[in-house]
Amino acid sequence: MQYEAEIPSGLRVGESFMAQTPYGVVPVQVPPGYRPGQRIRFNVDGSTGRPQQQEPTVVVGRPLTGDVEGGRGGYGSYRYRVDPKDATVSGMPFLQGIPVKQAERKVEEIHKGGDLAAQHEPFPDSRKCQDPLWILPFFAVVAAVIVAAIIFAPQLNKDIHSSNKDVDWPTLSSVLVGGGAGAAVSLLSALAFSALAKAAPGCVVWTSLLLGPSLVVAMGAAMLVFGSGIVGLIFIALGAMMFGCVFICWRPFIPFTIRIVEMVSGVMMKHPGLVGVSFIGTVVGIAWTIVWGIAFAGLYQKVQGDISSHQTVNADGTTHVSRGQSAEFYGMLFGAALAFYWGAQTIYNVCHVTYCGVFGRWYFQRESNSLVKSFTVAVTTSFGSICFGSFLMAAIRALETVVSNARRNAQEDGNIFACIMLMLVECVISCIGDLLEYFSEWAYVQCAVRGVSFMDAARITYSMMTCANMEYVISDLLINSVVSLGAILCAMVSGGCGAVAGAVVGGKASAITGAIIGAFCGAVAGGNAVGILNSGAKTILALWAEDPRPLMNMNNDMHNELEEKIMSKM
C-alpha cells in the first residue's frame, strides 16, 4: 500500500523519522537531495509492516500534521505541481517553445514568488502597513474633489434651474425614495439570488448564459415590429450566433461552473454579513459618483470657454474650430477621469479584499470573527496596496477615456485616418486595462490572506498559479456570466420598485425618475453583492493552487475535479 509523508523540520539527508500508517509506526529515511517540508512516497508491505521507499515527490503547501493514504485524490496525486523554489525551464509546460532568456526570466520570477510565499504565512498574527506612500495621495485627491464639489455646487444648481425654468424637475423626496427603494430591494434580490445559486446552481448558470442572447433577440424582434427591419435582423442573427456559442463552445464548461457556483454560494450564505459590506461599498460608491460629477461639471462649466475649442487657420485664410481638441481639455479630462476611477476602483477593491479575507479564512478554517478581521485588514494594513493597485487601473482607464474622446472628435471632424488609428490605440489600451483588472483581482487574494504588498502579491500569485498549472482550470470557468446576470436582475427588480415608490410619492414624473435612479442603484448594489461570488471563486482557486489539502478535506469531489481538469490537459 502506498503512503506519503512530509519530512519534518530539523532533519538532514540520511536521517530517519517515524510515519504513522495503518500497519503501525514505520521509519522513513530522508533521501539525498531533499530537505524538510518536502514529501516522499513509500510503500508498506502489509505482511511485514516494513516501508519500501520510492522516488520522492515535491508539492506546494503548508506543513501537514499526520499522514494520509496516497492514490487518487490523495497527496500522492500531486504530480502536476511543481515547487516554485525548484521550478526549471524544462519542468514548466507553458515555458516550452519560447526564447530561452525569456523563459529563464519567468523562472526567476517564479522563484521570487515562491520565496515570498515561504516568508509570509497565511493570516499572520500581526501585519505591517503595506504600500503606505499611496494612502496620502489618494486622500489628497478625494479631498480635492470634495472641496471642488462644495465650491461649484451652488453656482451649478443656480445655472441649471435658471436655464431650464420650464422643466418639471423631480422632487428631492422622489429621488431619495426611488434610490433608497432600489438599493434596498437590490440587496434583498442579491440575497435571494445567492440562495437560488445554492439551491439550484444549474438553473442560475444556464439562465445567466442564455439571458444575453435572449435579450439581443428580443431587441431585434422589437426593432422589426417598429419598422427597423435590417437592424432588427442583424440583432436576431447576432443573438442566434450567441446561442450557438453557448450550446457549442461553452457547453463543456458549464457543469464545472455549476459546481463552483454551488460551493461558493454555500460559503456566502454562511456569511450573510458580506452583503452588508457590499451595501456600505454601494453607498460610498454612489456618493463618490455624485460628488465627482458635481465637481467635474462645475469645473468644466467654469473653464469650457478657454479649453473646449481649438482654432486653426487654414491655407485659404479661413478659421477651423475643433471642439474639445486642445491640450488643456485633454489634460483636464485625464485628471478628472483619473480621480473618478481611482476612487471607484479603491471602493470596489476594499470590498473585494474583504470578501477574499472571509473566503480565505473559511478555506483555512480560521473563521472566528472573520468578517470584522477581513474588513479591518482592507481598510488598514492593506489599504495602501489597494490604493496602489487601484491607481494603476485608474491610470489605464483614464487614458482610455482620453483616447476615446479624441476618437469621437476626429470622427465628428471627418478625419478618417485619425479616427481609425485612435480606434486601434483605444482597443489596445482597453485590452491592457482588462488584463490588469483581471490579474489584480487574483493578486488581491494574497493581500487579504498574507498581508503583503501589491507587487509581492502579484509575484506570489504568478508563482503559485503557474506552478499548479491553473490556466487549465481558469479557462473553463464562466463565473463572470453568473455575476453579470445577478447585476442585471437586481437592476431590473430595483428599477421596477423605484418606479412604484416614485409614483406613490410624486406621480408619473417621479415614477420615471425613481425607475432610473432605482435601476442605477440596483445595478451598483446588486453588482457589488453578487460580485461576492466572483471574489469567492478566485480566492478558493488561488488558495487551492497554493495548498489543495484544505479543499480536499472539505470537498474532495471538487478537489478531484480540479485535479482531473489539469491532468487531462497536460
Image (cartoon, rainbow, N blue to C red):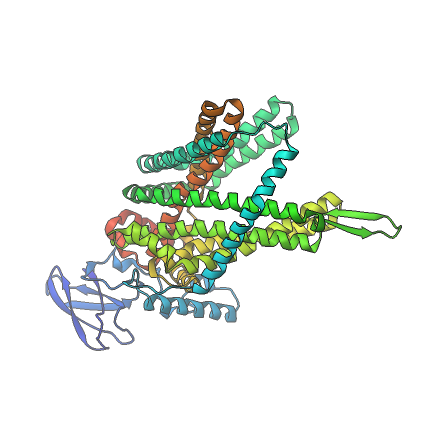
**Residue drawn where x is 43% and y is 41% of the image:** 483
Foreground: 222 or 360?
360
**Residue 362 position in % (x across, y down):** 28, 51
Residue 502 sits above or below residue 186 on the image? above
Residue 395 sits above or below residue 38 on the image? above
Residue 88 sits above or below residue 353 on the image? below
> Going by the image, does 31 lie left or right of 480?
left
Residue 503 seen in the figure: yes
**Residue drawn where x is 60% and y is 50% of the image:** 401
Residue 462 location, quadrant: bottom left
* Residue reaching furthest to the right: 316
**Residue drawn where x is 27% and y is 73% of the image:** 35
Q: Which quarter of the figure is the C terminus placed in?
A: bottom left
Q: Which quarter of the figure is the N terminus placed in?
A: bottom left
Residue 432 location, quadrant: bottom right
Residue 427 seen in the figure: no
**Residue 268 position in % (x across, y down):** 32, 43
> Going by the image, does 93 lie left or right of 363?
right
